[in-house]
Amino acid sequence: MNTSTSREERFAHGLEVLKRVDGRAGEQVVDALADVSPELGHQIVAWAFGDVYDRPELAPRDRQLVTLGMLTALGGCEAQLDVHVNAALNVGLTPEQIVEALLHSAVYCGMPRALNATFAAKQVFAERGLLPLGGRSPQEPASSPAA
């Protein structure tokens, strides 16, 4: 962090990043904090998005994959998953890639948390008109044996 940057400049930069990644959903989270913890809203914008999220070492899509995995692992973060599934779509991840990341998380986080995260993603996909997703059914084998 550049210590010569003012609090207002950090917030303005973070708000630009937040809008680019989360769109209106991120702003709504900050707005919802205005009457209870405006400082938490400020820190989300200035620190989380302005200082951390905008670092160049990871691309936004990679940051969203990490975020989806961590929110899934934590469990009980469905409201935040809603925002970050939308953000993942906004930064170029496909619904199929998001579902694959959540499926992968079942190995490390457990089936209940992966299910909860997948259902949160399903709701976002439905709201954005992205369902049904392609792919084979769970009963369909990956390949048919040769006759």
Image: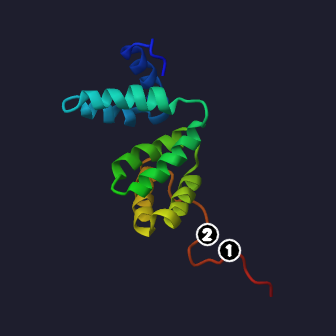
Q: Are marks 2 and 1 in contact (CB under 8 Å)?
A: yes
Residue 129 appears in the picture as rendered: no
* Residue type, mark 2 in image: Arg
For the C terminus, the image quarter is bottom right
Q: Residue at x 44, y 25 (%)?
A: 14
88 vs 122: above or below? above
Farthest-out residue, left? 35
121 vs 25: above or below? below
Farthest-out residue, front? 3
Q: Earlier in the sequence, mark 2 or mark 1?
A: 2
Q: Circle 1 sits on which residue?
A: 142
48 vs 85: above or below? above
Q: Secondary structure at mark 1?
A: loop
Location of residue 44 in the rendering, given as x and y in whole percent from the top left corner: 37, 32
Location of residue 140 in the rendering, given as x and y in whole percent from the top left corner: 62, 77
Location of residue 51 in the rendering, given as x and y in whole percent from the top left corner: 47, 27
> On residue 136, which mark appears?
2
Q: Secondary structure at mark 2?
A: loop
* Residue type, mark 1 in image: Ala
Q: Nearer the viewer, mark 2 or mark 1?
A: 1
99, 135: nearer the viewer? 99
Location of residue 103 in the rendering, given as x and y in whole percent from the top left corner: 53, 63
Q: Residue at x 25, y 33 (%)?
A: 33
Residue 1 appears in the picture as rendered: yes
Question: How far separated are the C-alphas under marks 2 and 1?
Answer: 8 Å
Q: Residue at x 46, y 47 (%)?
A: 85
134, 46: nearer the viewer? 46
Name the colouring of the figure: rainbow
65 vs 90: above or below? below
> On residue 4, which mark appears?
none
88, 107: nearer the viewer? 107
